[in-house]
Amino acid sequence: MALAGWIGEHLLNENSLPKPIFFFKALRKLNFKFIGEDKEDDSLTQFFSGKNVGVTVSFEPFSDSLFLQIYPLKKRISPSMTIRAQYIEFYDQFVVSVEPAQRLPHGIKSVGINALIIEDSYPISLPYWGMVHEDWENDLKLLVMLNNIYDDLEGREYRCPICFSTLRREGEALKCDSCGFVFTSEENFDKVLSEFSLEVGEEIFKV
C-alpha cells in the first residue's frame, strides 16, 4: 500500500508517472532487493524480491502506464495483488488503483480498495490506503494520511495497510511492530513527527 501512496504523491508533485529509479529507492526502503530486468522495444520490467514476496514493475512509457505485481514466492498458484497506475487520455486523468488478483490475506475482509483519481493536479477520488506521505526517501517510516482516511483506519480497526499485521495505538499514531511503519493524520502530523524524531535522536545517542 505504501507503494501506491508514493506513486500517487509523485503524480501530484510531478504530474507524471515515476521513472525506474523511483522504484529502486522505494522498494529498497521496504527491504526488497533488485534481481534483474527485461528490456523490450516498448516496455521495461524490473524484478525485486524480499523474504517470501516477489515484485515485478512493468513500465510502458508509450502508453503512460505502469503495473506492479506483488506475489508470494513459495506457492505454485498464489494470490497476488496489482498496483496499476496510468494516464486515461479520454478523461484527462491519472488513476492509481490497488487490485487483489484473487483473495486478501486471512482475516482481512476488506481494505476499502478504491482508486486514486487525479484531475488537473487535484485528487477527485481518494483511496483507503492514504495519499500524503512525508520524507519517504529518508529513514522515517512515517505515513501521513488525510484526516478522514486515518480516522477510518483507526475506527474500523484495520490491520497495517502495508503488511497486514496488527496495528498498535501509541499516542496520536498507529504503529506496526512488524514492518516498522507509523501511521498518523495530517492534523497530528507535526506532533507525531517531533516525538518520532526525538526517539530516533535518542537511539543515535545511545549508539
Image: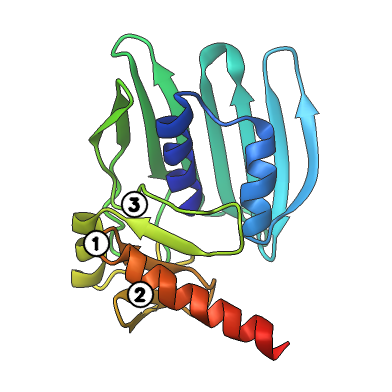
Q: Is residue 146 above or below residue 84?
A: below
Residue 51, image x and y in percent?
69, 66
Residue at image location 28% in from the left, 13% down from the top:
91
Q: CA distance from mark 1 to mark 2?
A: 14 Å
Please give left or right for residue 197 compared with residue 25 in the image: left
Which disc is residue 84 wearing?
none
Residue at image location 18% in from the left, 56% down from the top:
148
Residue 60 is at least partly visible in this image = yes
Looking at the rendered structure, the number of numbered marks drawn on it comes to 3
Residue 122, image x and y in percent?
28, 29
Give the position of the C terminus as an image quadrant.
Answer: bottom right
Residue at image location 61% in from the left, 49% down from the top:
26
Which disc is residue 130 wearing?
3
Under mark 1, the amino acid is: Glu
Which disc is residue 187 wearing?
1
Mark 2 — residue? 174
- The quadrant holding residue 106 is bottom left
Q: CA distance from mark 3 to mark 1?
A: 14 Å
Q: CA distance from mark 2 to mark 3?
A: 14 Å
Residue at image location 51% in from the left, 23% down from the top:
65
Asked which secondary structure carries label 2, the reply is strand
Disc nearer the start of the sequence (3/1): 3
Under mark 3, the amino acid is: Gly
User: Dot 2 surroundings within 10 Å: few (below 14), some, or many (20 or more)?
Assistant: many
Circle nearer the viewer, 1 or 2: 1
Give the residue at the far bottom of this rendering: 206
- The quadrant holding residue 94 is top left
Under mark 2, the amino acid is: Leu
- The quadrant holding residue 127 is top left
Q: Is residue 41 above or below residue 96?
A: above
